[in-house]
Amino acid sequence: SVDISTFMRQTGLSTLDNGFVNTAATKSAITYIDGDQGILRYRGYPIEQVAEQSTFLETAWLLIYGELPTPDELASFDTRIRRHTLLHEDLRRFFDALPATAHPMSVLSSAVGALSTFYEDTMDVHDPEQVELQTIRLLAKLPVIAAYAHKKSLGQAFLYPDNSLSFVDNFLKLNFGTMAEPYVVNPVVSKALERLLILHEDHEQNASTSTVRLVGSTEANMYSSISAGISALYGPLHGGANEAVLKMLAEIRDSGQGVARFVERVKNKEDGVKLMGFGHRVYKNYDPRARLVKESADEVLAALGVKDELLDIAMELEQVALSDDYFISRRLYPNVDFYTGILYKAMGFPPRMFTVLFAIGRLPGWIAHWREMNADATTKIGRPQQLYIGSAARDWPAGR
Ligand code: ACO
């Protein structure tokens, strides 16, 4: 008798599934998506209710541990995270070696990878206490690393975390505070950012989460696995789309070509131009997160007194696209990235930080998946097959 994989290989029954469109790589109990209906649930709770009623850390707990925390559990989770926000001083100096022009996503993945070098002694993936420590450290330190990547690009001094502040407020202060004067958090910005981070917390087997799982399946530690996930998120077809949307909107405004002409270029696939922030592998309906972000955009811009003509262009683009047969027949709707950039910009973040914000939001999901996979005794190293299309066997040229 032979096992099933040997049988499949010997009989040539492997399937080729370009882009893994039809292949489930795992079972998971974390997030449910129905892309046709536009439904997203975290551990069974509808995203609309989570975004309205929860906080970033409470949602993180839910995703990672499976149930809502008790008040005591949440308080101790929050305290542990606050106590781990400081970076090793040598890691602070690590940023000195990088160019100020570096994209903050590259800085982020490098610095998270570098965390491995500081915690060599506590990286046993089979020891629950060490897994817990990796979880807490990542949640505590990623926002600090992200803020330092931002400060580095501005040439400003890094601030130390202020552990009297909440997760989101601390992050805002690290980004926008200076040594020169006290920083007061704007509650409108804080609430909006918390909501955006919650909306990004998990999205089942997307490219970056699948990367984290694949790397983690080799029993690589959480820092290395998540550093790889950050690199996967960087690309414009994934998390990088939020930065690309803003570039696209600015280009439409500055070139004076108008929305209708731009949409024509997209439909004709001129120079491979795409409507960034539109379309999704799973959603063939309005992305429920995009709906929530759009609601926030109007509210937050009004509360901050910001008038942004890019929002007007985005709304016009959406209207034109949603009534055009090209987009209707392909079931292309705005995804979560379509409106987020406008909000991040209103909060004062430069476009190069947008994908970094996505990464902070997605971190609990990456951790939850890494842990779910490692807790499952049936997990095997991820190792896809290929269909070989190269040369048949041939002899090396004599005398070469
Ligand atoms: N603009 C124009 N046409 C599009 C777009 C778009 N944004 N997205 C898909 N299409 C077209 C494709 O050209 C293709 O048309 P065709 O049948 O004439 O060849 C058809 O719609 C199907 O598209 P695929 O590329 O097969 O869809 P896939 O599921 O592989 O790609 C993806 C999904 C990558 C998200 C794609 O829609 C895209 O590139 N969107 C723009 C980038 C973006 O916003 N990414 C963020 C995704 S959400 C996230 O990661 C958080």
Image (cartoon, rainbow, N blue to C red):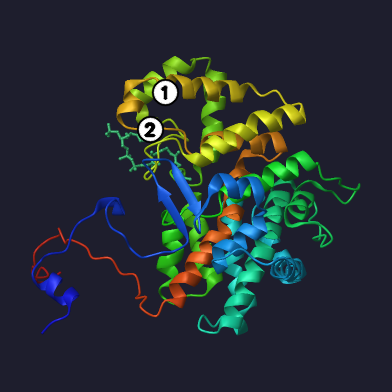
User: SS at mark 2?
Assistant: loop
Q: Is mark 2 within 8 Å of ligand 1?
A: yes
- In which of the image's four quarters is ligand 1 placed? top left
In this picture, is 183 found above or below 389? above
Q: Residue at x 71, y 67 (%)?
A: 81
The numbered dot on residue 332 is 2
Q: Left or right: 127 with respect to 177?
A: left
Percent coordinates x, y for residue 342 in the rendering: 62, 33
Would you name the residue on which mark 1 appears?
A: 321
- What percent of the width, then of the height, locates residue 102? 61, 50
Question: Can you say which quadrant of the picture contains the C terminus?
Answer: bottom left
Q: Give the x, y percent position of residue 198.
A: 61, 50
Helix, strand or loop at mark 1:
helix
Judge the density around disc 1: few (<14), some (14-19), many (≥20) Cα neighbours within 10 Å.
many
Check whether the beta carbons of the residues at disc 1 and disc 2 lie within 8 A of each other.
yes
163, above or below 240, in the image: below
Residue found at x 49% / y 15%: 258
Viewer-proximal residue among 130 and 108: 130
Along the line of sight, which residue is nearer the eye, 389 or 214?
214
Left/right placement of residue 1 relative to residue 240 reads left
- Cα separation, mark 1 vs mark 2, equals 8 Å
Question: Where is 366 relative to 194, above or below?
Answer: below
Where is residue 14 drawn, in percent x and y? 16, 63
Residue 321 visible in rendering? yes
Residue at 80% over, 53% down: 157
Going by the numbered disc 1, the residue's amino acid type is: Ala
**Up/down of 140 relative to 260, above or below:** below
Of pointers 1 and 2, the one earlier in the residue sequence = 1
